[in-house]
């Protein structure tokens, strides 16, 4: 099994989502010996945002990087994403990565009946950090966007591990992190 671990927070060691995504990956590594993990820090090693030059594949190095990102995405079984909420959405570095893996003919296709996702069968776990309390993701564009885009690609198994209210006080942060750590999903689900 192959896991792709992405971090997108600009806060480095102070990041709630980096802490949570690392804990998710560690739990999976403990439970699944031999799990192969690929890691990318989208803040330290950002993906170029889409431009006309990128779309035209005018830069050979950028085109090759786009192909590597797409191949890495297609090859993984599980994606763990550290995704803080920035201004009610996701960091632009994560959006730039999504723009490189949402590729017509590769991860989705258009049909007479509408778009069809081609990247199904994967599981996505998002470590979500929020300064305030937003609830189930209906009052923001972070969770709804990520559910929509991965669903568009054919991925229906999208879970969120939330730490909310982390900017309200040190106690809120500690409580939110404790609750989020307790909610980390296990690799294998038991039948209900």
Image (cartoon, helix red, strand yellow):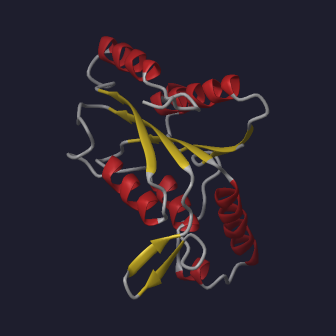
Q: Quadrant of residue 162?
A: top left
Residue at 28% x, 26% y is 165
Q: Quadrant of the N terminus?
A: top right
Between 93 and 180, the one lying in front of the other is 180
The answer to whether residue 37 is left or right of residue 120 is right
Residue at the spot x=43%, y=65% of the render? 152
173 lies above or below 192 = above
Identify the residue at the far left of this view: 139
Which x, y percent locates residue 130? 33, 34
Residue 170, compared with residue 118, is above or below; it is: above
* Residue located farthest toward the front when viewing the structure as drawn: 192
For this view, does 169 lie left or right of residue 105?
left
| In the foreground, 128 or 46 | 128
Q: Position of residue 137 (x, y in %)?
A: 27, 43
Whether residue 39 is visible to the viewer of this picture, yes or no, is: no
Q: Is residue 56 visible?
A: yes
Q: Residue furthest bottom?
A: 112
Residue 153 in picture, x, y percent from top left: 49, 65
């Amino acid at each position: 099994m192959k896991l792709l671990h992405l971090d997108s927070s600009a806060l480095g060691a102070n990041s709630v989502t980096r802490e949570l995504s690392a804990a998710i990956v560690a739990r999976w590594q403990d439970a699944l010996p031999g799990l192969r993990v690929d890691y990318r820090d989208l803040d330290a090693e950002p993906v170029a945002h889409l431009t006309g030059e990128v779309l035209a594949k005018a830069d050979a190095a950028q085109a090759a990087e786009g192909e590597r990102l797409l191949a890495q995405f297609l090859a993984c079984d599980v994606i763990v994403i550290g995704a803080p909420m920035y201004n009610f959405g996701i960091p632009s570095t994560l959006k730039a990565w999504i723009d490189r893996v949402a590729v017509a003919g590769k991860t989705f296709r258009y049909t007479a009946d509408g778009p069809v996702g081609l990247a199904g069968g994967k599981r996505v776990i998002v470590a979500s950090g929020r300064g305030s309390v937003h609830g189930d993701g209906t009052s923001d564009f972070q969770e709804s966007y990520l559910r929509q885009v991965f669903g568009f690609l054919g991925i229906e198994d999208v879970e969120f591990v939330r730490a909310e209210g982390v900017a309200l006080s040190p106690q809120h942060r500690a409580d939110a992190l404790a609750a989020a750590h307790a909610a980390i999903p296990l690799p294998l689900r038991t039948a209900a």
